[in-house]
C-alpha cells in the first residue's frame, strides 16, 4: 500500500504507533535483538517514537525550545554561511569536477545546525561521520553497533559540555527543561530527542539540496523557468520534496490493534514501513506524469515528505528556509554549472531510508563576476 491517501490515513490513525516498547511484541519479547543493525531506529525514546500522551508531552517540550522565532533568527546566518561556502567553491577551478554533495549540500546544513545546537568545532566532523553511518542501512551488524555507541558517547559529551557552559542554543534550552523539572523530561529522552533533531534536520536537508541540484541540472528547461521568474525557488523546493522525498521510507510503525487499511487487514503488533517516496509519486494525486520533475505542477505542495498530522516535522520550516537560500545563492554564483556525468550515472545512497546520491559531481563553470 503506497498510495498518498492510504499513507496519510496511517500517519494520523491512533491505532498506529511508533513505540516499539509498547506495541511491537517481537521487540518486547526479545525476538529482535538489540544488536540488530537497525535497532537504534526503534530503541530511541524521543517525540517521534513516543505514543499518545508521551508523544504530546515530548513534542510540547521540544516545541518550547525549537520555536519559530529561533528559526527566523537563523536567516541571516544561513545567508552568511551559504556565502562563505560559495566563496570557498569559487576558489576551485571551474573546469574540474567537484562533489557538490560533499562540499556544498553537506557543509551548509552542518554549519547551520552546529550554530543552532551550539556544537563545538571539535565535535562537528565526528558527528557528520556518525550521522552518515546512522543512515547507512547496508552497514554490517558490528559497524552499526559501533556507530550507535559512538553517537551516544558524542551526544552525551555535548550535553555535559553545555551543562558546564550553557549558551543561547537549542541544546542548552532543552537541558534547561530537563534540569528545571526532571519529571517532564528524563535524561535518556533529552539525549534521544537531541539525536532525533540533529540527525533528521541534517540528513533531510543534505538530501533536499543534493536532489534539487541534480534535478535542476538534469532538467535545464525547469531551471530556465526559475531564471525567467516563471517559477520561484520555493516551487523548486516543494517539487523536489514531492518527487524525491529526502527520507524515502519511515521505519517503523506498529498496529496497536487489528486494523483494515485499503482492504488489507494489518494484524495487531505487525510492523509497518511508510513509503514517503511512493506517496509523492501517486498518479491519483499528481497525474500520470507524477514521476516527472515539474516546478509548475499544481500539486507540488501536496506531499507528505515531512510527515503529516501530530508527527509533522518540527524542523520543516528550517529545512525549507535553508534550501531556498542555498539554492538561490548557488545558481546565482555559478550560472553555467552543469553535471560532470550523465544523470543516469549518479549513484544512489546505499540506504532505503535516506534518499540522495553518494556523490554529486559537477563542473562549476565561471563565477558570476557580480558576486565575487
Image (cartoon, rainbow, N blue to C red):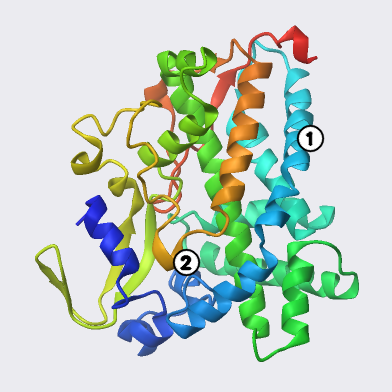
Q: Nearer the viewer, residue 135 or 168?
A: 168
Q: Which residue ends up furthest to the right in the rendered image?
A: 165
Q: Which residue is label 2 attached to?
A: 141
Q: Work out whether mark 1 precedes mark 2 in sequence or the reverse, and give the earlier one.
A: 1
**Quadrant of the rendering where the N terminus is positioned:** bottom left
Which element carries disc 1, helix, strand or loop? helix
283 on left or right of 82: left
Residue 57: percent from left, percent from top: 55, 81
Pointer 1 local density, CA inside 10 Å: few below 14, some 14–19, many at least 20: some
Q: Residue at x 72, y 13 (%)?
A: 93
Query: Pointer 1 and pointer 2: residues touching (CB < 8 Å)?
Result: no
**Is residue 30 visible in the rendered structure shown here?**
no
Residue beneath label 1, please?
A: 80
Task: Tell me, yes or no, if residue 79 can be seen here.
Answer: yes
Image side of residue 300 versus residue 87, left or right: left
Q: Position of residue 100 (x, y in %)?
A: 60, 29
119 relative to 82, above or below? below
State the count of labels: 2
Task: Indicate whether 63 appears above or below 323.
Answer: below
In the figure, is residue 326 to the left or right of 76? left
The relative height of residue 112 versus residue 237 in the rendered view (above or below) is: below
Mark whose residue sits in front, 1 or 2: 1
Determine the CA span between mark 1 and mark 2.
Answer: 40 Å
Quarter of the C terminus within the rendering:
top right
Residue 137: quadrant of the picture: bottom left
Q: Residue at x 40, y 80 (%)?
A: 20
Secondary structure beneath dot 2 equals helix
x then y, percent, for residue 148:
58, 68
Circle 2 Cα neighbour tier, 10 Å, few/some/many (<14 / 14–19 / ≥20): some
Amino acid at each position: 500500500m503506497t498510495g498518498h491517501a492510504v499513507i496519510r490515513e496511517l500517519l494520523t490513525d491512533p491505532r498506529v504507533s511508533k513505540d516499539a516498547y509498547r506495541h511491537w511484541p517481537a521487540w518486547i519479547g526479545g525476538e529482535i535483538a538489540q544488536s540488530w543493525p537497525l535497532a537504534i531506529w526503534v530503541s530511541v525514546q524521543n517525540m517521534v517514537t513516543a505514543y499518545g500522551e508521551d508523544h504530546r508531552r515530548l513534542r510540547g517540550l521540544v516545541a518550547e525550545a525549537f520555536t519559530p522565532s529561533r528559526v527566523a533568527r537563523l536567516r541571516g546566518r544561513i545567508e552568511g554561511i551559504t556565502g562563505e561556502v560559495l566563496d570557498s567553491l569559487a576558489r576551485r577551478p571551474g573546469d574540474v569536477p567537484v562533489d557538490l554533495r560533499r562540499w556544498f549540500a553537506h557543509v551548509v546544513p552542518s554549519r547551520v545546525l552546529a550554530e543552532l545546537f551550539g556544537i563545538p568545532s571539535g565535535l562537528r566532523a565526528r558527528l557528520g561521520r556518525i550521522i552518515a553511518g546512522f543512515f547507512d542501512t547496508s552497514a554490517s551488524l558490528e559497524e552499526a553497533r559501533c556507530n550507535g555507541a559512538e553517537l551516544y558517547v558524542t551526544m552525551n559529551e555535548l550535553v555535559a559540555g553545555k551543562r558546564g557552559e550553557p549558551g543561547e542554543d537549542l541544546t542548552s534550552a532543552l537541558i534547561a527543561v530537563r534540569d528545571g523539572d526532571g519529571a517532564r523530561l528524563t535524561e535518556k529522552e533529552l539525549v534521544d530527542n537531541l539525536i532525533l533533531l540533529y540527525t533528521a534536520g541534517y540528513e533531510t536537508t543534505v538530501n533536499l539540496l543534493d536532489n534539487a541540484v541534480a534535478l535542476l541540472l538534469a532538467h535545464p528547461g525547469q531551471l530556465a523557468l526559475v531564471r525567467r521568474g516563471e517559477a520561484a525557488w520555493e516551487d523548486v523546493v516543494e517539487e523536489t520534496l514531492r518527487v524525491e522525498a529526502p527520507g524515502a521510507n519511515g521505519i517503523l510503525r506498529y498496529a496497536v490493534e487489528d486494523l483494515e487499511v485499503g482492504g488489507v487487514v494489518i494484524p495487531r503488533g505487525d510492523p509497518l514501513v511508510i513509503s514517503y517516496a511512493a506517496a509523492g509519486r501517486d498518479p491519483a494525486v499528481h497525474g500520470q506524469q507524477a514521476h516527472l520533475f515539474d516546478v509548475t505542477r499544481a500539486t507540488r505542495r501536496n506531499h507528505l515528505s515531512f510527515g503529516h498530522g501530530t508527527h509533522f516535522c518540527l524542523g520543516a520550516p528550517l529545512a525549507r528556509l535553508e534550501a531556498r537560500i542555498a539554492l538561490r545563492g548557488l545558481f546565482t554564483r555559478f550560472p553555467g554549472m552543469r553535471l560532470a556525468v550523465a544523470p543516469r550515472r549518479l549513484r544512489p545512497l546505499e540506504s532505503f531510508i535516506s534518499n540522495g546520491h553518494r556523490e554529486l559531481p559537477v563542473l562549476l563553470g565561471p563565477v558570476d563576476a557580480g558576486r565575487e
